[in-house]
Image (cartoon, rainbow, N blue to C red):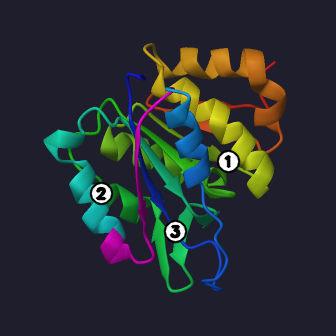
Amino acid sequence: MAANGIFCLEGEWDTDLRRRHSVEPVLEFLERMRETRYVHRDVATTTELAYYLDQWGQARYDDYQVLFLATHGDLGTLSWSRKHTTSLADLADLMPSNTQHCYVYLGSCLTLFAEAEAKKFVARTGVSALMGYREEVGFISGAAFELILLSYVANHRSYPKRLFDDLMATHGGLARLHDFTMVTRRSVLSSKDHP
């Protein structure tokens, strides 16, 4: 089993509650393939987000080093439901203090197009890397890339740049579809800039 578990918080994808869009089947597949283990919770409000981030910060979840926030997004923001949106600055305020070796993956469209806010988030929280997209992401192509990305991150035992380079060497074409981006303490790595 993987070195890093995944702690996933998923927002509402649709206002019609009969629709069942979810990233959880991706996580179930990875767990069944013994690539990782995961915790998944639904989040529709900023209060729920704060509660689950506080839970994630507890010692019993120390081996869940990958935070996966799956929801709609826009420049520098995450939308948990129609009425509840969180900026990267607000998200940084909610993060637990023990995130220095964690990876945060934003499964949302456009959020990392706000590069200055992403850099500030990494500086304030001390996470190893903030990952996400600068473009629109289709649900199916996004899920295909998430399978690969989450497996890499869950089983990663090196520096973030090495993870990024390894991912680009084998799956760069898929990453470039949505301008996958990784922001670390030292740099901003864009799949579109990678040879």
Please tell me whether mark 3 sits on a helix, a strand or a loop: loop
Helix, strand or loop under label 2? helix
Q: On the rendered image, what quadrant is the C terminus found in?
A: top right
Q: Do the residues labelled 3 and 2 touch (CB within 8 Å)?
A: no
**Number of numbered discs:** 3
Labels 1, 3: front one? 3
Q: Residue at x 49, y 26 (%)?
A: 34
Residue 28, image x, y percentages = 54, 44
Amino acid beneath label 3:
Gly
What residue does disc 1 label?
A: 133
Quadrant of residue 183 in the image? top right
Query: Which element carries disc 1, helix, strand or loop?
Result: strand
Question: Which of 118/146 is in front?
Answer: 146
The mark that comes first in sequence, 1 or 3, is 3
Whole-number angstrom distance, CA of label 1 to CA of label 3: 17 Å
Q: Residue at horizontal 79%, vertical 56%?
A: 138
- State left or right for residue 36 relative to residue 46: right
Residue stretch rendered in magenta on the structure? 35-48
Q: Please tell me how crowded label 2 is: few (under 14), some (14-19), or many (20+) other residues with Cα within 10 Å.
A: some
Which mark identifies residue 153?
none
> What kind of residue is marked 1?
Tyr
Q: Which of marks 3 and 2 is nearer the N terminus?
A: 3
**Front one among 16 and 181:** 16
Q: Nearer the viewer, residue 6 or 25?
A: 25
Q: How far apart are marks 2 and 1 (CA)?
A: 22 Å
Query: Label 3 belongs to which residue?
Result: 11
The residue where tag 2 is placed is: 53
- Residue type beneath disc 2: Leu
Residue 137 location, x and y as percent? Answer: 76, 54
* One can see residue 39 in this view: yes
